[in-house]
Image (cartoon, rainbow, N blue to C red):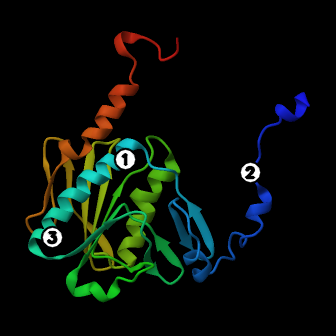
Amino acid sequence: MGKLLNRRPEPTWAIAELFPAQGTWSEDEYLDLHTNRLVEFSDGYLDVLPMPTTSHQQIVAYLYGLLLAFVTTKDLGTVLFAPLRVRLWRGKFREPDLVFMAKEHVSRIHEQFWHGADLAMEVVSGEGEDEDRRRDLVVKRREYARAKIGEYWIIDPREQRITVLRLAGKTYAVHGEFATETVATSALLSGFSVDVTAALAPAVRATARRRPRNGQSKHR
């Protein structure tokens, strides 16, 4: 009996076997998947993203509030946040942290997913996870340009920087790289701006809470 109690728990593999194998998922099967996790889709494969941290969500909430107020006041379109499926092209779905669709493109908004977007924002996940950072900094930059998303904001808490990219042909050009104590601006939405220090403040507070005080070790 003692051996059973000490057995290391394993995933319920039988449940996993009820779903298609990686590489064989169809778009319909992906869209029928109901979960509160962020799950992206690429050519038959599912990518289950890590759960966001509190500071990550606080940054997203701050940016959402600013963008929503700006867009609503000027009646420019629709702003939403993840989880929300955005179809970049057939066989490729992402779930950006924040998306904006201009009202003249409202026909691209469907109940289950959006067909692209006019602006996307991503708060870079992880503090040191190379795969997570590469996804936002490199992979999505290439994919969002291919999908003709007009503007892409990369909010990087670790580097304390917001990079705003504007679509120039088939690739992105840098509209601006904005550090703390500066104001990030949009090329697409004239007049929209973000105080970088205020936006990234939750990450700064989270880092301070983790830092040992007076040279003390975290472990007692």
Question: Which residue lies under the disc numbered 3?
Answer: 72
Image quarter where the N terminus lies is top right
Label 3: which secondary element: helix
Where does the image place residue 131, in percent across and percent down from the top left? 52, 52
Depicted 202 relative to depicted 100: above or below: above
Q: Amino acid at mark 3?
A: Thr
Label 2 Cα neighbours within 10 Å, binned few <14 / some 14-19 / many ≥20 = few
Q: Is residue 94 left or right of residue 206?
A: right
Rendering quarter of residue 186: bottom left
Q: Amino acid at mark 2?
A: Pro
Question: Which residue lies under the disc numbered 1?
Answer: 56
Depicted 35 relative to depicted 204: above or below: below
Q: Is residue 1 left or right of residue 173?
A: right
User: Which numbered dot is residue 11?
Assistant: 2
Q: Amino acid at mark 1?
A: His
What residue sits 76% from the left and 54% below the top? Answer: 12
